[in-house]
Amino acid sequence: MSIKRRSFEAGHKRKYLVVIDETEECDRALFWAAKRAGRTGSQIVMLRVIEPGDRNQQWLGVADIMKAEQMEAANAALDQFAVRAKEIADINPDRVIREGDTAEEIVKLIDDDADIGILVLAAGVTKDGPGPLVASVAKSAGSFPIPVAIVPGHLNDEELEAMA
């Protein structure tokens, strides 16, 4: 059972959750979410999930260095997309970095933040289908704790703005 959403209660604000990853279509999800959040007085939460390191590795120093590099790369990606959200809709997004499986961390973050009301994903533009994250979420759509907006990854800024 999911927790009650609180985004419209006093002291709360609806948040759009956008997963920041290496896919081409990631910018499409952020663009639509930023435009929509700007028009509705909402906020954006950007989530970056990093791979869990091998905790049983013989060379723990190497594992620590690898994790530090992943964190640095995650922060750089979040910095880049935060600038983009600011340009699009004058929004300073919340930033979250989690370690683990992306689909699991999305659900955990939604459970942790009762203001998150919509997950925004963008569908892939290749012939391989909508992308692994969209496919994963679609499998559990019937029991997913919040609505999911899937933005077509092939749309340009003007087309997305018209729909936001």
Image (cartoon, helix red, strand yellow):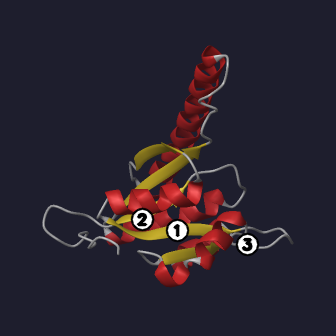
Which residue position holds label 3?
130
Amino acid at pointer 2:
Tyr
Query: The residue under label 1 is which amino acid type?
Result: Val
Determine contact: label 2, label 1, CB under 8 Å.
Answer: yes
> Alpha-carbon distance for marks 2 and 1?
7 Å
- Secondary structure at badge 3 equals loop
Mark 1 closeness class: few <14, some 14–19, many ≥20 residues within 10 Å: many
Q: Calculate the distance from the C-alpha at mark 3 to the C-alpha at mark 2.
A: 20 Å
In the image, residue 7 above or below residue 103: below
Q: Quadrant of the N terminus?
A: bottom left
Q: Which residue is mark 2?
A: 16
Q: Residue furthest right?
A: 127
Disc with the residue nearer the chain's start (2 vs 1): 2
Q: Residue furthest left?
A: 10
The label on residue 33 is none
Which residue is at 49% across, 59% downward?
106
Q: Is residue 97 above or below residue 72?
A: below
Specify the quadrant of the image occupied by residue 138. bottom right
Residue hosting label 1: 120
Q: Nearer the viewer, residue 94 or 70?
A: 70
Secondary structure at badge 2 equals strand
**Callout 3 crowding tier (Cα within 10 Å): few <14, some 14–19, many ≥20:** some
Instruction: Judge left or right: residue 108 versus residue 137.
Output: left
Looking at the image, which residue is at 51% across and 85% down?
A: 142
